[in-house]
Structure formats: structure tokens, C-alpha cells
Image: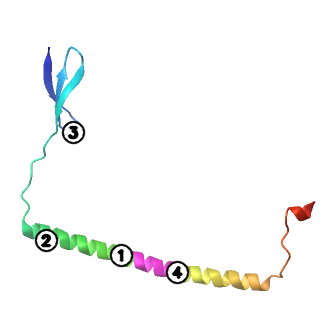
Amino acid sequence: MATFSVTCPHCQALLEVDGERKVIIGSQAHEAPRTAASLEGRLQALTEEKAAARAKMEEAMRNERAGASIREEKFKKLLDVAKSEPVTKPVRDVDLD
């Protein structure tokens, strides 16, 4: 049996290939080297993430408040238009016969 090992160019996994059958008979996932993160660095990253989340929340709240006032104005305009139009009987399909 002619087997050989190759490294996948996409995921860097080690693949064992059977050359005669032209199939992969085994694989071993690539393990990325771990980097030592300092506690101070992680705390700084958490602080930045917290600030970013707070900024997103404030932006969403501003958008919601602005949207609510716009919807209120539109409702008032449509209500004024509806009050100024004469009341008519709705036309039903049955009435058209």
C-alpha cells in the first residue's frame, strides 16, 4: 500500500492519502500555536469591548427615540388627513354585482 502525507493548503491539516485508491485514509487537525496573553492585555481588551458595546447600545437607543418621534409625527399627519376627508361607505365586492 503506497501511502503518503500531505499538508492541506487551506486548513494546514496533515492528511494521509492512499495513493493506489486515491482516498484520504486519515487526517490530523492543525493546532495553532498558543500565544501567552497577559492579564493586563486581556483586561484592556475587555474594557475596549465593554466600551464598544456601550456605544452600540447608546446608538441603538438614539435611533429608537428618533424613530419614535418620526412615527408620532407621521401618525398625527395621517390622523389630520383622515379627519379632513369625508366619511364614505366602503365598497365591497358583493356590492359591485
User: Is residue 70 located in the magenta-colored stretch of the structure?
Assistant: no
Q: Residue at image x 19%, y 73%?
A: 47
Identify which residue, 6 or 94, lies in the foreground: 94
Spot the residue most to the right.
Answer: 97
Q: Is residue 84 left or right of residue 73?
A: right
Q: Earlier in the sequence, mark 4 or mark 3?
A: 3
Residue topped by disc 4? 68
Marks 4,3: beta carbons within 8 A: no
Which residues, given as a range, are shown in magenta? 60-68
| Gap in angstroms between the C-alphas marked 4 and 3 | 48 Å
Q: Is residue 94 left or right of residue 1?
A: right
Kind of element beneath mark 2? helix
Kind of element beneath mark 4? helix
Horizontal and vertical percent for residue 93?
A: 85, 62
Kind of element beneath mark 1? helix
Marks 1,3: beta carbons within 8 A: no
Height in image: 18 above or below 45? Answer: above
Q: Amino acid at mark 4?
A: Ala
Residue topped by disc 1? 57
Q: Earlier in the sequence, mark 1 or mark 3?
A: 3
Determine the main secondary structure of the stretch shown in magenta.
helix
Where, quadrant-wise, is the C terminus in this rendering?
A: bottom right
Horizontal and vertical percent for residue 19?
A: 19, 17
Kind of element beneath mark 3? loop
Identify which residue, 10 or 15, lies in the foreground: 15
| Gap in angstroms between the C-alphas marked 1 and 3 | 36 Å
Height in image: 37 above or below 64? Answer: above
Determine crowd level at label 3: few under 14, some 14-19, many 20+ residues with C-alpha closer than 10 A.
few
Label drawn at residue 43: 2
Quadrant in which residue 83 is drawn? bottom right
